[in-house]
Image (cartoon, rainbow, N blue to C red):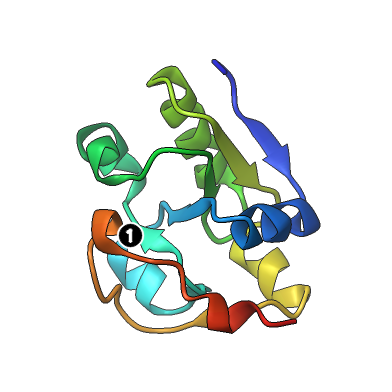
């Protein structure tokens, strides 16, 4: 995959449920104000340098509304990863009634396991 595709909330939710990682590309203070439950935070400008922290498999990028996440997904695709951008970002995720949390990221991306208990819908 050399290009990134935008996906809707239902598709992103299904991908997350199947184990794909969510990367929030906003700045840490934006991430801490509220993010998709289980998302790891790697700011857009740091993606190329930190790509090695991400597990193998597909990646869903997210920001507040979807603009930066599309750029992040395109960056990851250029670096050889399969990446998708959540159309509408965290705001669309919240509007769909899916879990978000506030606060800083507890651990680095490579050591993070997705908190499935948040997705018992």
Residue 23 relative to residue 112: left or right: right
Residue 56, quarter of the rendered image: top left
**Can residue 88 be seen at all in this image of the molecule?**
no
Q: Nearer the viewer, residue 95 or 98?
A: 98
Residue drawn at x 31%, y 71% is 29
For residue 60, above or below residue 106: above
Residue drawn at x 33%, y 59% is 27
Residue drawn at x 64%, y 77% is 119
Residue drawn at x 29%, y 37% is 51
Q: Residues within 10 Å of mark 1 (few under 14, many from 20)?
A: some
Q: Nearer the viewer, residue 100 or 120?
A: 120
Instruction: List x then y, in percent, for residue 48.
Output: 27, 31
Q: Secondary structure at mark 1?
A: loop
Q: Which residue is mark 1?
A: 27
Instruction: List x then y, in percent, for residue 118.
Output: 58, 82
For residue 70, above or below residue 106: above
Q: Quadrant of the C terminus?
A: bottom right
Instruction: List x then y, in percent, for residue 37.
Output: 51, 74
Instruction: List x then y, in percent, for residue 113.
Output: 38, 66
**Can residue 104 be seen at all in this image of the molecule?**
yes
Q: Quadrant of the N terminus?
A: top right
């Amino acid at each position: 995959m050399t290009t990134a595709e935008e996906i809707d909330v239902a598709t992103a939710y299904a991908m997350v449920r199947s184990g794909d990682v969510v990367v929030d590309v906003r700045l840490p203070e934006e991430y801490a104000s509220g993010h998709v439950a289980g998302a790891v935070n790697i700011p857009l400008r740091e993606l190329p340098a930190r790509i090695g922290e991400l597990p193998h498999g597909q990646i869903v990028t997210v920001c507040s509304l979807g603009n930066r996440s599309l750029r992040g997904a395109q960056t990851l695709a250029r670096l050889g990863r399969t990446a998708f951008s959540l159309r509408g970002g965290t705001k669309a995720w919240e509007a769909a009634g899916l879990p978000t949390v506030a606060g800083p990221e507890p651990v680095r991306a490579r050591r993070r396991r997705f908190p499935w208990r948040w997705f018992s819908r």
